[in-house]
Structures are given as C-alpha cells and as structure tokens.
Amino acid sequence: MILQGSQLQRDFALETDVLVIGSGSGGAVVAHELARAGREVVIVEEGRYIRPEVYGQWRPSQTLRRIGRAGGTTVALGIGDSPTINILAGSCVGGSSVLTGGVCFRIPEEVHEEWVRSLKTTSLSAEAMAPFYEHIEAMSHVSPVPIEMRTRGTELFAKGAERLGREVFPISRNTKGCCGCSRCNFGCPNQAKLSVDLTFLPKAQAAGARIFSDFRVERILVEGGRAVGAEGVILREPDRRAAHRFTIRAKTVVMAAGTLHSPLILMRSRIGRRSGQVGRDITLHPAFRVGAFFDDPIYNWRGALQGAYCTHPTDDRLIFIGASAPVNFLTATVPGLGPAWVQRLRSQMRHMATFGGMVHDKAGGRIWTRLGSEPVITYRLNPQDKASMLEGMRFLAEAFFAAGAREVLLPIIGLEPIKDMDQLRHLDLPSMPGSRIECLSFHPLGSCRMGADPHRAVVDVEGQCFDVQGLWIADGSVFPSSVGVNTQIPVMTMAARTAAAILEH
Ligand SMILES: Cc1cc2nc3c(=O)[nH]c(=O)nc-3n(C[C@H](O)[C@H](O)[C@H](O)COP(=O)(O)OP(=O)(O)OC[C@H]3O[C@@H](n4cnc5c(N)ncnc54)[C@H](O)[C@@H]3O)c2cc1C
C-alpha cells in the first residue's frame, strides 16, 4: 500500500524511527536496508505514485510531463564558453530509476583509488565496497545485453569502431525479460527493467516500510544540533499545488532527494553552511548523441536501447554508449523545419543510427536557491571537457563513416549534415563555441559532497552531516567527484554503504 497524499483531506503528523526523503535509487536502497534490519521506516516522495502497468502504456510526452522532473524542462544555464544543458531526472515513486536506460557499471577502480587518497579512507576502495556492489547487483538482476539484442545502429557503430581499432564491449543492464523496444527512458512497458519501484521499494514495504507520495519536504527539523524530522507540504491534483501541511518526527533522517534537491532542502534548513559546499561543484557527465544516415533501413528503435560501449583511443575521460529512443522522440531531435523537413523525416528516419558519448567532467555546476520548489542551476564547462566532447563527436562520426554512413549529424546547433570523412577532417571542431553544443545530462552528482574536512565537505565519509547529528545523505549529491560511467549502481551501492553505517551507529 502506498499512501497517496493527493487524496488526503487534512494536515498530517506522524512519528517514526527513520524518515527517508525521496524514493529514487538512493532512498529506496536505504529504506530497504533499514526496514529489513527491523527499523520502522517512512519514505516521503514529492512525486506521484504511478503503477508500472500504467506508466508503461503512456506516450513518451505523457511520461515526461507526469514523471519527468519539471516536465523535462530543467536546464543548467551555461556560463562562459559552455552549452546550456538539459538535465533529466525523475520525480515519482522510484525517482530517476524509472527513467534509466538500465545501464549498469561499477565505479571505475581509478576513481575509487582517487577517493581513497583524497578522503583518506580505505572504506571507499573497490575492494571494501565489493560486498555492497554484489548485493545491489544481485537484487537488481544485472546481466550483460546479448549481442543479438543490439540495435542495428549499435551493430553498425561497433563495426565502424572496430575498423578504427577500438574494441566494443557488451553493456550490463538491470533487466529481466527485456524484449528490446528501446522505450526504457519513458518507463518500461513490460516491467522488464528492474527499477527500484519493482525491486527495493516493494521489498522495503514487505519489511514494514511505509511510502507516502505527493509529500514535498521543505525543511529538516533540528533540535539541539540533532535532526528530529522534517516538514513540508502535501500536493493536490491536478495542479500539484500545496493543499495541506505535514510534520514527521523521526530519530534518524535520511535525505535522498537527489543532487538537484537535497542541497535546496539543506539551504532552506540553513544546514551545512560551514562547509561552503552546499549546492557547489556539481558535475553533470555532459552527454551528446551523433546520428548517421545509412542507405539500408536501420529501424534503430528495434533492440536494446543501450547494448554496447567503447572508450576513446587517447582520451580516457570519454566513454561511448549506445543510445536509442522511440521513433517519435528520435524524430524530434533531428534539426529542421517546414514541409521539406517533414518529408525527409518520413522517408529517412528508418535509415538513422545513433550512438552517444559522455565526459567524466570536472566540477562546474552550482545550484542557487530560489523561492519556488525548483533550483536555478548554472554550469561552467571546463575547457578540457569541452575539447573532449568535441573530440568525442569526431570519433563517433569517424566510426559511422567507417561503417558506411552516407551522412552524419553532429549535435552542433546550425551545423549542416557532414557528407564524408574529408569534410569531417576539415571541420574546425575545436573552435566551435560551447553555446552551439547540444548537450544533455542524466547524471548530476556532488552538490553535498562527502569528505574528511567539515570546512570543505557537507557529509563525513560515511554520509552523516557534519553539522547536524542524525541527518544522513544517501543519494548522488554526496559523490566527491564525477565517476565517468552511468550512476545508478554507484548511487545505490553508496546508499547501501551508508545504510550499513546508520545501523552501526
Ligand atoms: C532519463 C535518465 C536516464 C538514465 N539512465 C541511466 C542508466 O541507464 N544507467 C544509470 O546507471 N543511470 C542512469 N540514470 C541516472 C540514475 O537514474 C541516477 O543517477 C539515480 O537514479 C540517482 O539517484 P538519486 O537517489 O540520487 O536521485 P533520484 O533517483 O532522482 O531520486 C530522488 C527522488 O527524490 C524526490 N524528491 C526531490 N525533492 C524532494 C522533496 N523536497 N521532498 C520529497 N521528495 C523529493 C524526487 O522526486 C525523486 O523521486 C538516468 C537518469 C535519467 C533521468
């Protein structure tokens, strides 16, 4: 049973042992671990509760409107030579987990080593975290995508990349019974993608946890330097305005509202100011996608959305990952206007292959408070990261030409399609203004950093707030740096580690 706040007719108050704020990848895992250890757990979630068999039938535009954060319109405003980046996140019971492509990676060993060095704790080593990874991967059914499930576009990219001397590897995903309809990012229609609303949350409920949807936390309650709960508003339908207020008192509060919202709640509660880090130094894994037209039909939406990956020959901060989408969504990403464009898409969409890339970026983002419930976000793209992105686009284009593409579309606003390798070679990509890059982010991290020094970090190396006892953070916001790979397994694994620390305390 999930209590849907939108159906409540009054203010609401409750006392519990543990309050978890946010039901996404981090919150669901903590709630499960604490509930199965016998703690009384309540999860409050700002978004709606939508049953998987319902969201699975929606059109992509409906999904974006109803469970995409701010209807999919969140952006980081580019500062200096930077693009404006569209940041996607989920807001529903299950959080962003419902919208993932299902891609699963562990944090690379060298990132673990860097964290061990900079945070001065071996508890963040790949070895120390192995049991947490194993637990999360087993619960999420992580397994490699069979080669026969790759889209034709992925096959062509793999052929081209291999001709350029790069090995292409299968991706692992958290799926069971996937039929390959490339719809993962809009909620799986077959409940085959094992997002946390199908795994950790029902298991947490079975262990006694309660979930309240439509509950938006505004402020953490603090008494005598200790977190004692949270208060906020209960949202009504259909306009999602505040209808009632709630107060939940708890012995332990775990914040898992995600990288964009955990810092907002801290700012409103005036917590973490000593660190000077709340809402600062955010990383985004800036991502881009290259399209290529082939003579033969590709039907790029038939197969696993993301089936394979490879790395760049010289730039180890780049990773290339398969990227597809339902045909209507894919069509909307092809630049152009007017009847000639419509005609071209009608005849050509089935011939288009796509592949994506992203950068293991340096911190350049910042969240600013605002009176409303959404943050204002800015991002300054590091010049080295910009160079990597442009180089990544070149590599994807080269691979597609090596596989026989007749035309390549680079994600640069106003740039005409590239007809061949010669034209690509003569293109002055490095001097392209950052504002012309079409860029997305699915992995914001690091707005409430973990660290050893309370003057430079918001939470300690276990995830407890330096400034307020009994307040823990267990979401992407605590990451000390970007990780260079997709973030759901990293977030869930770090959350499982924090849950173990809470139980130990
Ligand atoms: C479109 C998309 C595709 C992705 N694909 C992949 C992929 O293939 N592989 C991968 O590894 N990762 C992927 N990711 C990233 C992954 O989903 C995230 O890294 C991960 O879910 C982050 O977990 P989190 O707990 O930090 O935040 P979230 O999962 O975003 O959860 C935060 C929750 O807190 C709620 N919340 C926010 N504010 C409040 C408040 N004030 N009160 C109450 N609740 C609140 C939100 O509504 C949300 O449900 C993708 C993300 C997106 C958006």
Image (cartoon, rainbow, N blue to C red):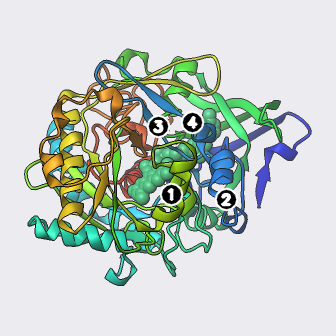
- Kindly identify which residue carries mark 1: 345
Sequence-wise, which precedes: disc 3 or disc 2?
Answer: 2
- Spatial CA distance of label 4 from label 3 is 7 Å
Q: Residue at x 53, y 42 (%)?
A: 337
The C terminus lies in quadrant: top left
Sequence-wise, which precedes: disc 3 or disc 1?
Answer: 3
Question: Is residue 375 something that shows in the picture?
Answer: yes
Q: Which mark is residue 59?
A: 2
- Spatial CA distance of label 2 from label 4 is 17 Å
- Horizontally, is 180 left or right of 220 in the view? left
Callout 3 environment at 10 Å: few (<14), some (14 to 19), or many (20+)? Answer: some
Q: Is residue 223 above or below residue 25?
A: above
Q: Is residue 390 above or below residue 136?
A: above
| Circle 4 SS class | loop
The amino acid type, in three-letter code, at marker 4 is Thr
Q: Which mark is residue 73?
A: 4
Q: Is residue 369 above or below residue 185?
A: above
| Circle 2 SS class | loop
The amino acid type, in three-letter code, at marker 3 is Asn
Question: Is residue 26 something that shows in the picture?
Answer: no
Q: Residue at x 49, y 67 (%)?
A: 182
Comparing 1 with 489, the one in front is 489
- Spatial CA distance of label 3 from label 2 is 20 Å
- Spatial CA distance of label 1 from label 4 is 25 Å
- Kindly identify which residue carries mark 3: 86
Dot 2 beta carbon under 8 Å from ligand 1: no
Sequence-wise, which precedes: disc 1 or disc 4?
Answer: 4
